[in-house]
Amino acid sequence: ILYNTKNVTSNQIGFSDLVLPTLSQAAIEASRNFRKFDARKVNFTALESVYGLVQCTPDLTTRDCLSCLQAINNKLPDDKIGGRVNVPSCNSRFELYAFYNDSAVRTPQPQLDSDSPPPPISIPSPRPGKRRNSSVMIIAVVVPIIVLLLLFVAVFIV
């Protein structure tokens, strides 16, 4: 367990009531997500935000990931301004500063537009000169092979 040595100085109960539920919700989302990862930013005060990140190894099932994250989230200090727990299968961290790139971890929201149908799939029709090109290609490959075989046979017969 690693933690920031600074204590929460104001509204410690409010801080605890914010951090643990945020990481619990992140754990639920991460366990359901194929990436086994979730990061969150929540406002603590008008000027301060809490940044949280949880992650499991991809081999864990949804249930095992959630169980691992819940176990380590309960070990995090609730009186410090930051903390992290790393175990082999999962990790959890929170800080009062952005320790990850917020724009890199956000997933784009799917744009739902039920009015427009999907674009039609077009299959290209064969071009008129395509058949002629394949005939030329076959001749260009087969003729040199036959010539080489004839030369090979001629060398051994003589």
Image (tube, rainbow, N blue to C red):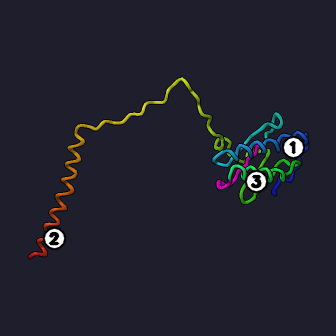
Left or right position of 79 against 56: right
The kind of residue on which mark 1 rests is: Ser
Q: Residue at x 81, y 42 (%)?
A: 21
The kind of residue on which mark 3 rests is: Cys
Q: Earlier in the sequence, mark 2 or mark 1?
A: 1
Q: Please, what secondary structure does the residue beneath circle 2 have?
A: helix
Q: In the displayed structure, would residue 133 be above or below residue 60? A: above
Q: Which mark is residue 152?
A: 2
What residue sits right under mark 1 in the picture?
16
The alpha-carbon separation of the residues under discs 3 and 2 comes to: 71 Å
The quadrant of the rendering that contains the C terminus is: bottom left
What residue sits right under mark 3 in the picture?
68
Q: Position of residue 34 (x, y in %)?
A: 63, 47
Query: Could you classify mark 2 by the number of other residues whose Cα lies within 10 Å: few (under 14), some (14-19), or many (20 or more)?
Result: few
The alpha-carbon separation of the residues under discs 2 and 1 comes to: 86 Å
Q: Residue at x 42, y 33 (%)?
A: 121
- In the rendered image, residue 57 lying in the magenta stretch gets the answer yes
Q: In the displayed structure, would residue 6 be above or below residue 125? A: below
Q: In the displayed structure, would residue 25 be above or below residue 90? A: above
Q: Please, what secondary structure does the residue beneath circle 1 have?
A: helix
Q: Please, what secondary structure does the residue beneath circle 3 have?
A: helix
The kind of residue on which mark 2 rests is: Phe
The quadrant of the rendering that contains the N terminus is: bottom right
Tell me which corner region of the image, top left, top right, bottom left or bottom right, holds residue 88: bottom right
Left or right position of 151 against 101: left
Q: What span is in magenta?
A: 50-60
